[in-house]
Amino acid sequence: MGDGVGLRLDEAFRRHGPEALATLIRLTGDFDLAEEGLQEAFAAATLAWAEAPPANPRAWLITVGRRRALDQLRRRIAFRARRDALEAVAGIERQAIPDEADDTAFGDDDLLRLIFTCCHPALALEAQVALTLRTVCGLATAAVARAFLVAEETMAQRLVRAKAKIRAAGIPYRTPPRELLAERTDGVLAVIYLVFTEAYAGEPGRSLAGEAIGLARRLDALLPARGAIQGLLALMLLHEARRPARHDAAGDIVLLEDQDRGLWDRAMIAEGLALVAPALTADSPPSPYAVQAAIAALHDEAATAADTDWRQIVALYAVLMRLAPSPVIELNHAAALAMVDGPASALQRVDALAARGALAGYDVLPAVRADLLRRLGRCAEAREAYEDALRLARHDPERRYFTRRLAELSVSP
Amino acid sequence: MQYMLLIYTVEGDDEAQPGSIMEEFGAFTQGIVQSGAFKAADRLKPVATATTVRVRDGKTLNTDGPFAETREQLGGYYLVEAKDLDEAVAIAAKIPSARYGSVEVRPVWAMG
């Protein structure tokens, strides 16, 4: 088989795999059986599609995967006369088979069911993230493990336990009813945002930001005009757009104010900006994600750092503090205030925040303090604060950045 | 599927609630009896009367006291019929002491 065909198959599996899996899980009522069926369908497809791919690849994968799942169950019956397998066969045969001619059948609804099931609050958050990346995004277990810096075996165990809990505890395979939908959607968004932020902090080669954005786009298409979904999608796009400018050639951090704005991804910014207004007005009060997206938009819209509309950013942080108060938002609010009122009053706020101890262990707090102290000319204290930040930094680029700042402070008295 | 709703509270908190709490329990119980979800329920005696049973190497060990080493103690349970975990959790959340204690929802093996 030529490489061209192989690439086409990979692309088709990647595109249709998650949807086919979602439907197979519903048909079989069993994550593992569905995965096995789909794997066999992929294997069959590499032969069958070499000549000509079917008109509807998703339905083809579902039909073959379902047949292989049934074969698998029948083998279990033959060897062990398993009554539960007999019941499972009867259960699958009662379900309607998707029509190969109808591309809209099942796929979308089943993908939503799969997303909500993987992000069910009865599963631990880390299990939700792992299961979502593995089944909804179709990432290999090894890739999921790498992204979260755990051994592949550990990740495999986490996935096995999560699937066992779904089965044993009776977690329903469904899109939640209206009274639960908003709350459960927030749960899904928390998972997506975690994938995005972990990828954001991680090493460049290990990025999952694209997966997070892809998930949010799919969710936005399946549940349109929801402020929280649009807001998170916009927020991620408006941050991700700056990725090319965020590190220099040596991999060192470039601060927002120093970034080459010509490197920012304009298409991504346009997509994000178009979502901000509808996200802000969809609900009253707006989703915190929408407000954070509006803040990111103000940065992205400024032609130069000096053009940034800090007054409006401060006002939006004040809104955010009312909607979703948190020490991290308070810290960002203080940092933005420094750009309007100067560093002295901002430092008071940051010191008060530090005294409360809510952000102990968070390197950004001493980093913000250090910057304010530096701007006030209090160099010795600034140095101490950068040393605190250096101790707390979790990643090499941050460590190198704080070390650089310390060196600069040692040179200029 | 059947679910057992195990009620955890800090001992004495039941008594520290307003007198109407017992009426609330009564109303909750009546509600799920009428809806058909109710299977059985009991209030347990204080934790001082508890015994934890463990089996090690085929031998049964009896230990005085509760299994959980937290401030909260098992104080009762409801056994309910629910079509899935979401429904069981929704019922559990209506138990009055879910507000000042916690309720463990555990699926029950179907017999036979």
Image (cartoon, helix red, strand yellow):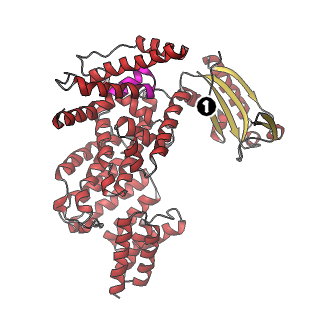
Viewer-nearest residue: A77 or B30: A77
The percent coordinates of residue B33 (x first, y second) are 66, 19
- Where residue A128 sits, quadrant-wise, is top left
Going by the image, does A313 lie left or right of A89?
left
**What residue does disc 1 label?**
B92
Viewer-nearest residue: A384 or A286: A384
**Magenta stretch, overall SS:** helix
Which residue is at a point 40% across and 20% down the rendered structure image? Answer: A69
Q: Quadrant of the N terminus of chain A?
A: top left
Secondary structure category for the residue under label 1: helix
Chain for mark 1? B
Evaluate whether residue B20 shows in this view.
no
- The crowd level at tag 1 (other Cα within 10 Å; few <14, some 14-19, many 20+) is many
- Kind of residue at disc 1: Ala
| Image height of A362 relative to A51, above or below | below
Q: Is A365 contained in the magenta span? A: no
The percent coordinates of residue A397 (x first, y second) are 35, 66
The percent coordinates of residue B7 (x first, y second) are 68, 35
Which residue is at a point 20% across and 65% down the rendered structure image? Answer: A307
Which residue is at a point 19% across and 21% down the rendered structure image? Answer: A55
What residue range appears in magenta? A20-33
| Image height of A44 relative to A406, above or below | above
Going by the image, does B22 lie left or right of A60?
right
Evaluate whether residue A195 shows in this view.
yes
Q: Quadrant of the C terminus of chain A?
A: bottom left
| Image height of A137 relative to A325, above or below | above
Which residue is at a point 41% across and 79% down the rendered structure image? Answer: A382
Q: How many marks?
A: 1
Going by the image, does A322 lie left or right of A401?
right
The percent coordinates of residue A159 (x first, y second) are 47, 38
